Image (tube, rainbow, N blue to C red):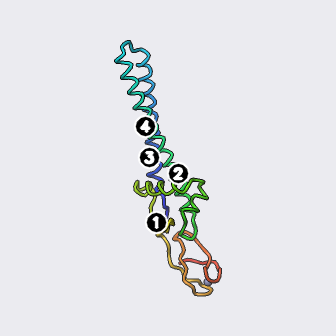
Amino acid sequence: MEHCDYQKLNGKRRALKIIIGFTAAVMVLVTILFFVSEQTFQFVVCSILMAVLISYLVIIAWIERKLKRTTVYGHILDEDHDGSITLERICQISGYPVSKVKKDIKWSVDQGLLRGFDYENNRLIMDDLKEVICATCGALNLVREDGSGKCKNCGSYLKRG
Ligand SMILES: [Zn+2]
């Protein structure tokens, strides 16, 4: 099971690229208007419009960076083997600071981009774990649905199904 809705994520990123292109085009238009303006009123309107457009672009760039980081978190979650990963580990792998990762993950979950885990004590627990009984020693292990693992008791490789 994928913990990141890559389809939705890529759709959002594509939409943002279109918005950025459109905004840039409007900015060019406003710049031209600014230079052909002959009245103070027109200068003022163009300047205000430009300020609004620049702020808009800054916000969009901020969202785009968040979406990019969400892709990284998705890959980390999908590649995790034992179904439990600490925020600290995510920070180590991604290179992003804890405070950022914390906020990002909450945001991504709210946006429906990351899913399929419980968040507790700075740790993400995947909810696609299955119970597997070790064929060698009979111990009960939890293994991810599409993953494999070693028995926690005897170290043998676990076979599912
Ligand atoms: Zn075993």
Q: Three-letter amino acid code at disc 1? A: Tyr
Element under disc 2:
helix
Residue 109 in the image: x percent, y percent?
A: 43, 58
Q: Three-letter amino acid code at disc 2? A: Arg
Q: Are discs 3 and 4 less than 8 Å apart at CB?
A: no
- Residue at 52% in and 53% down: 71
In this rendering, the answer to whether 94 lies above or below 38 is below
Q: Are discs 1 and 3 less than 8 Å apart at CB?
A: no
Mark with earlier residue (2, 4): 4
Disc on res. 69: 2
The yes-or-no answer for disc 3 within 8 Å of ligand 1 is: no
Separation of disc 2 and disc 4 at Cα?
Answer: 20 Å
Q: Nearer the viewer, mark 1 or mark 3?
A: 1
Give the residue number, with chain letter if any, for mark 4: 19
Residue 110 in the image: x percent, y percent?
A: 40, 56
Element under disc 3:
helix
Residue 103 in the image: x percent, y percent?
A: 47, 55
Which residue lies most toward the top here?
Answer: 38
Separation of disc 4 and disc 1 at Cα?
Answer: 33 Å
Residue 30 in the image: x percent, y percent?
A: 41, 23
- Residue at 62% in and 86% down: 136
Count of numbered circles in the view: 4
| Crowding at mark 1 (Cα within 10 Å: few <14, some 14-19, many 20+) | some
Give the residue number, with chain letter if any, for mark 1: 119
Give the residue number, with chain letter if any, for mark 3: 12
Element under disc 1:
strand
